[in-house]
Every structure is written in structure tokens, then in C-alpha cells.
Image (cartoon, rainbow, N blue to C red):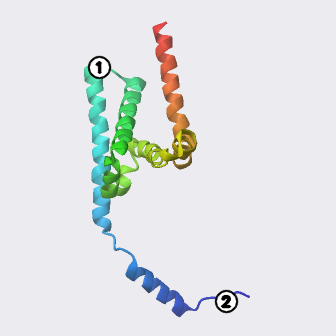
Amino acid sequence: MASRATPDVNEAYIRYISSVSPKTKEKRSLFNAFLVGGFICVIGQFLRYMLMFLFNLEGDELAGTVSMILIFFGAFLTGLGVYDRIGKYAGGGSIVPITGFANSVVAPAMEFRSEGFIYGLAAKMFVIAGPIIVFGVISSVAVGIIYYVAGLL
């Protein structure tokens, strides 16, 4: 028969955990997440308007182009180590937009690149980000190339 902890032990443990756990500033964290996540969305909207007015893109072409630019910048900033600093400041505000998904693909690939291209870079990219995200991006690029080539013929 397993012995159960007494209520005094549970309360003592909870007090101990509370004393050694870092205190979070919830309001500040929420504000930073809102600010950074909103700023990333503002950048996306700015890109959308610029591509719409400068290159006359619309519909799916416009949405796809903006998505690819944001994914590129998310991956690029991760490669430079900037996105990690943004993530520490913004928390969930940097994870939710599309740039956060790019970060979740690139960061583990960079971390495990010393293990080789297949077992390190490619395998860890699949483990962390999930096959759906990676296959979705790869297949959307492939379909885009097919449509582009078909349009030229």
C-alpha cells in the first residue's frame, strides 16, 4: 500500500515552490506580447499594402507573397539570433504570428546542425515544428512554382 503525503507536507512543498519560483509580472508580459505581436502584424499589413500598390498584386498572390516574406524574415532573424531576443521580451506575442512558425522550424535545425544534414538539421526540424508545417511550406512552394511555370506556357 502506497503512503500518501500528509496535508502539512503538501502545504510545505507548495510554500517552498512559491518561495524559489521567479515572480512573473503578468501585466507587463501581456503588454509586451500584445505590443510585439501587434507590431509583427502591422509589418505584415504594411507589406500587403506596399505589394498591392507597387506591384498590383491581389488575392492569393498577395497573401502568398506577404506570407513568404514574413516567413523569410522570421527565419533570417532566427539565424542572426535576433528572434530569440524578441521572444524573450515578447513571449507569446512572438510565437503566434507566422514569423513564430518560421522560428520554430529554423531554431532546432540550427541547434542540431553539428549532427549532420540528415540526422541533425532535417530530423530535428521535423521533430520540433512538426511535419505539417514543414510539408505545408514545401508543398506550397512547389505548387506555386508549378502554377508559375504553367502560366508561362
**Vertical comparison of 140 with 122: above or below:** above
For this view, does 37 lie left or right of residue 143?
left
Q: Which residue is mark 1?
A: 55
Element under disc 2: loop
Element under disc 1: helix
The residue under the point 54% across, 40% down is 122
**Vertical comparison of 92 with 40: above or below:** below
- Quadrant of residue 132 in the image? top right
Rounded to the nearest angstrom, the CA distance separating label 2 from label 1 is: 71 Å
Label 1, residues with CA under 10 Å away: few <14, some 14-19, many ≥20 = few
Cβ–Cβ under 8 Å for marks 2 and 1: no
**Vertical comparison of 76 with 58: above or below:** below
Q: Position of residue 149 (x, y in %)?
A: 49, 13
Q: Position of residue 7 (x, y in %)?
A: 55, 91
* Label placed on residue 21: none
Q: Position of residue 143 (x, y in %)?
A: 52, 23
Q: Residue furthest top?
A: 153
User: Which residue type carries mark 2?
Assistant: Ser
For this view, does 124 lie left or right of residue 64?
right
Q: Which residue is mark 2?
A: 3
The residue under the point 40% across, 49% down is 96
